[in-house]
Image: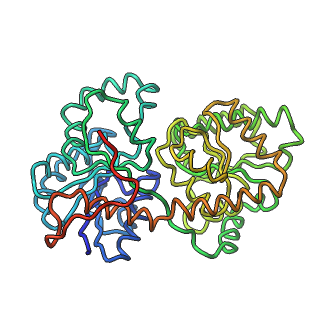
């Protein structure tokens, strides 16, 4: 039964990282199954990434008020067009697009759902207490009502659902844990390697440790750099031939600070900063990697982790990446705390592991992806969850039972 689905997100700029990447991949699979997918954002309609968006995109910008991205056009547009859609999905909170959906759709016959994308994790409260105090000023009037009145709030793991309850004592919503994942990589592995190595030929015969994604304080980039420098100082023979590949936009203030840190730690000779990579080059970066590292302080899912597994590349992650239990259970990588000492241990274990054992872990990584994180399973889970929770369904259809995992109790 085809659904007409509108995704609402702050921006469709691919440099935004996981939320827009996940949205596009879910939409691609749902579209193949007959569902009609569109997206509304707060982007300037003239932005080049809007022109390149693979989905019909209704850009309601330009937006104002800094990172909050207010636009007066979004609410009237949603009110005028809501009957064109069976369901609306909010991607992310704490920006105007989310509050606008509540203003336009609360109390109407158009059900909306919310992906929080880890934005209620209590790590943010601990790390940024002043920002959290500021959020309290908005919470009772905006995000609390958004979640309370949603047909359901989607979490991509049990850990994310559990942690979301710890940020604000005023909290009420219908919680549903849904599968999440990423697409199977394109088949042309050799062509992808060539595409990547044509730009970075120095990485052809080295042991490459890959970080791929948006450089942000929460991702533990400083831990990774400091840990690698410490291992290199303590056991130089172990790091012979190792290269750290930092793939992601690094032009902002934090990215520049991390580049300076790498220089201070004496890592410039073994670190390659690629900038943002996409398409065959992105997949080539995974294909040329021996391991993938993400010692994050907070990660509700980690699309890049799943992409690494899909390429058969084991991952070195912290236990703050909310799918760490699945990784550990399937022996698809190594897991530690989000500290420099634990990250040093992960690197040492990887570098010292005999090749046959590491090859077995590569096989386990591929199997873990196929069993748990394929996007087609996530897309099916999303559709079933919406049909089971929506107040009004197209064509008078009856709700269907969602697949496991089921809704968690409040």
Q: Position of residue 158 (x, y in %)?
A: 43, 44
Q: Quadrant of residue 83?
A: bottom left
Residue at 64% of width from left, 39% of height from top? 259
Q: Quadrant of the N terminus?
A: bottom left
The front one of 307 and 253 is 307
Direction from residue 243 to residue 259 in the image, left or right: left
Q: Is residue 181 above or below residue 67?
A: below
Residue at 19% of width from left, 53% of height from top? 74
The front one of 174 and 218 is 174
Q: Is residue 86 above or below residue 150?
A: below
The front one of 351 and 170 is 170
Q: Quadrant of the C terminus?
A: top left
Residue at 23% of width from left, 58% of height from top? 88
Q: Position of residue 61 (x, y in %)?
A: 26, 53
Q: Is residue 191 above or below residue 66?
A: below
Residue at 39% of width from left, 65% of height from top? 379
Q: Position of residue 232 (x, y in %)?
A: 81, 37
The front one of 47 and 106 is 106
Q: Quadrant of residue 194?
A: bottom right
């Amino acid at each position: 039964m085809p659904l007409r689905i509108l995704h609402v997100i702050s921006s469709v700029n691919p440099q935004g990282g996981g939320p827009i990447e996940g949205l596009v991949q879910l939409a691609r699979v749902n579209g193949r199954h007959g569902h009609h997918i569109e997206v509304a954002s707060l982007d300037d309609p003239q932005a080049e990434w809007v022109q390149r968006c693979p989905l019909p995109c209704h850009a309601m910008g330009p937006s104002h008020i800094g990172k909050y991205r207010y636009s007066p056009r979004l609410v009237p547009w949603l009110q005028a067009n809501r009957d064109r859609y069976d369901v609306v999905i909010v991607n992310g909170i704490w920006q105007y697009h989310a509050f606008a959906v509540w203003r336009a759709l609360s109390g109407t016959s158009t059900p909306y759902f919310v992906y929080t994308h880890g934005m209620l994790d209590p790590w943010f409260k601990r790390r940024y207490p002043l920002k959290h105090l500021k959020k309290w000023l908005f919470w009772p009037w905006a995000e609390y009502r958004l979640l309370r009145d949603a047909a359901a709030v989607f979490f991509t793991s049990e850990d994310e659902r559990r942690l979301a309850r710890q940020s604000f004592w005023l909290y009420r919503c219908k919680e549903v844990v849904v599968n999440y994942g990423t697409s199977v990589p394109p088949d042309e592995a050799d062509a992808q390697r060539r595409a990547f190595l044509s730009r970075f030929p120095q990485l052809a015969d080295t042991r490459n440790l890959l970080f791929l994604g948006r450089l942000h304080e929460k991702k533990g980039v400083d831990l990774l750099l400091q840990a690698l420098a410490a291992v290199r100082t303590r056991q130089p023979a172990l790091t012979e031939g190792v290269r750290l590949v930092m793939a992601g936009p690094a032009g902002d203030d934090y990215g520049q600070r991390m580049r300076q840190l790498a220089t201070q730690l004496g890592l410039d000779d073994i670190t390659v900063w690629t900038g943002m990579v996409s398409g065959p080059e992105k997949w080539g970066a995974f294909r040329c990697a021996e391991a993938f590292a993400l010692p994050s302080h907070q990660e509700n899912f980690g699309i890049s982790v799943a992409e690494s597994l899909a390429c058969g590349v084991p991952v070195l992650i912290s236990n703050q990446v909310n799918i760490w239990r699945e990784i550990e259970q399937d022996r698809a990588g190594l897991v530690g705390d989000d500290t420099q000492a634990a990250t040093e241990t992960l690197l040492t274990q990887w570098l010292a592991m005999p090749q046959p054992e590491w090859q077995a872990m590569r096989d386990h990584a591929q199997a873990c992806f196929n069993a748990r994180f394929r996007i087609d399973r996530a897309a099916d889970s999303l559709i079933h969850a919406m049909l089971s929770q929506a107040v009004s369904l197209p064509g008078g259809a009856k709700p269907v039972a969602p697949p496991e995992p089921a809704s968690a109790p409040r």
